[in-house]
Amino acid sequence: MTAAPATVLVPPGRVERWVDNVGVRHGELVLEVGDGALVGSAADGSSFAARLPFGRAYDGPADAGSFAAAVRNAVPGEWGLLLVRKGGFAVAAMRGTTTTASKVGQRHVQGRTKAGGQSQQRFARRRDNQARQAYEAAADHAARVLEDLARHGGPVVVGGDRAAVEEVLADPRLGRLEVHEPWLDVPDPRRSVLDEAALRAASCLVRVVNA
């Protein structure tokens, strides 16, 4: 029985070993290029399709080394990273894989309460106000850190809580940013989370089907 497809992010420095391991686990591996991706088909029926970051199409040789080099070259010269969750955000301006400017911040947003009636309503209004203030602060810092990208409509990778990210990106100052896959599932943003997210954003996106 074939398993449901899974998606993994593979950094360029690990691509060749990752492809070799597929052959070790699943048998003889045939590589080809199709639909802008490096496609692998294994002897046991397993397969994968690896795509370059930032929506770039791959049209090079059907080998892991060439594809790994293309992953590195696909990372834009200038791009941004925006992570938002309730009570926290992280934003970075990137040059290739180097962070040139960043900001990480936290704001307190109360959790839910079991109280009922008017107390619950007041609590909900307070929580919504705190969340809105947190998103406004995140948008202010994003507009500052990503000023050049926002002005010219450059690429950005986002992650965290979808509703929170959408609230921040709704700010008119960020309206020209071009959001690219992958969506990054991250915990509350901290400096270490931001650094890890930058590595994942610059990785290839691989759709895997195991037999």
Image: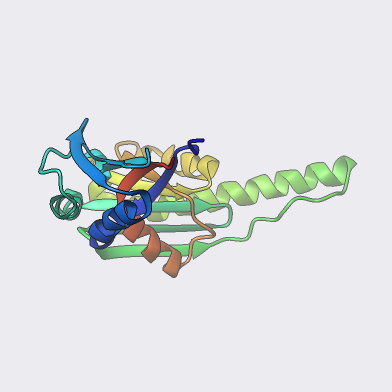
Residue 39 visible, this angle: yes
Residue at the spot 57% in from the left edge and 60% down from the top edge = 107
Residue 96 falls in image quadrant: bottom left
Image location (x, y in percent) of residue 70? 15, 50
Q: Is residue 144 visible?
A: no
Q: Position of residue 59 (x, y in %)?
A: 12, 38
Residue at the far bottom in the pictured view: 192
Question: Where the C terminus falls, by quadrant?
Answer: top left
- Coloration mode: rainbow
Q: Quadrant of residue 61?
A: top left
Point 56% across, 51% down: residue? 133
**Coordinates of residue 156 in the picture (x, y in percent):** 31, 46
Q: Residue furthest top?
A: 35
Q: In screen coordinates, is 159 left or right of 15?
A: right
At 60% from the left edge and 49% from the top edge, which residue is drawn? 131
Q: How many labels does the image show?
A: 0
Residue at (34% x, 40% y) in the render: 47
**Which sits in the foreground, 52 or 172?**
52
In the foreground, 202 or 95: 202
Viewer-nearest residue: 144 or 162: 162
Q: Position of residue 136 (x, y in %)?
A: 49, 49
